[in-house]
Structures are given as structure tokens and as C-alpha cells.
Amino acid sequence: MFNQTYYKSALKKIPQRYMLVNVLAKRIRQLQKGAEPLVEEKNELIPKADIALREIAEGKIWVGETEN
């Protein structure tokens, strides 16, 4: 499970829940493959989901519109 406080903060940045879940899942996969976190975390045991949610909540990751 993930930290509900981080989730609520991330929902303020990406209010569409399904979009948030998709962005979250993609970022978790990136972190699992070795991507560097965009937020500092002293505890190495923190779940990747919490790191990704913090990144979204702090505006380090966002959903932008694409050009056609």
C-alpha cells in the first residue's frame, strides 16, 4: 500500500484518478529499473510508490499536453 497523505497531495496535481494511477505506475516501473528519484529520501526502504507520489505532489512529474 502507499501513503495516503502523498496520494491526496498528488491528486491535487493530477485530479483525474485514472490518469494519476497511470502516471504513478509508469514512474514506479522507471524507479524499479534504476531511475534516480527526483526527491531526496534518506530512508532507502521507502516504497517506490511513495517516492513516485512525492515526486508528483511536489511537481517534479506532471502530465502535459502533447502537440499533434
Image (cartoon, rainbow, N blue to C red):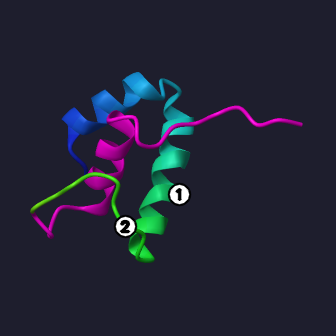
What numbered label is drawn on residue 26?
1
What numbered label is drawn on residue 36?
2
Q: Residues within 10 Å of mark 2 (few under 14, many from 20)?
A: few
Which residue sits at x=15%, y=69%? 44
Q: Is residue 13 left or right of residue 44?
A: right
Q: Is residue 28 above or below residue 66?
A: below
| Residue 30 counted in the magenta span | no
Looking at this rendering, what residue extends furthest in the right direction?
68
Main SS class of the magenta portion in the image: loop
Q: Is residue 51 left or right of residue 62?
A: left
Question: Magenta part of the protein: which range?
Answer: 43-68
Q: Is residue 63 above or below residue 31?
A: above
| Residue 60 counted in the magenta span | yes
Identity of the amino acid at label 2? Glu
Identity of the amino acid at label 1? Lys
Which residue sits at x=76%, y=37%? 66
Q: Is residue 30 above or below residue 9?
A: below
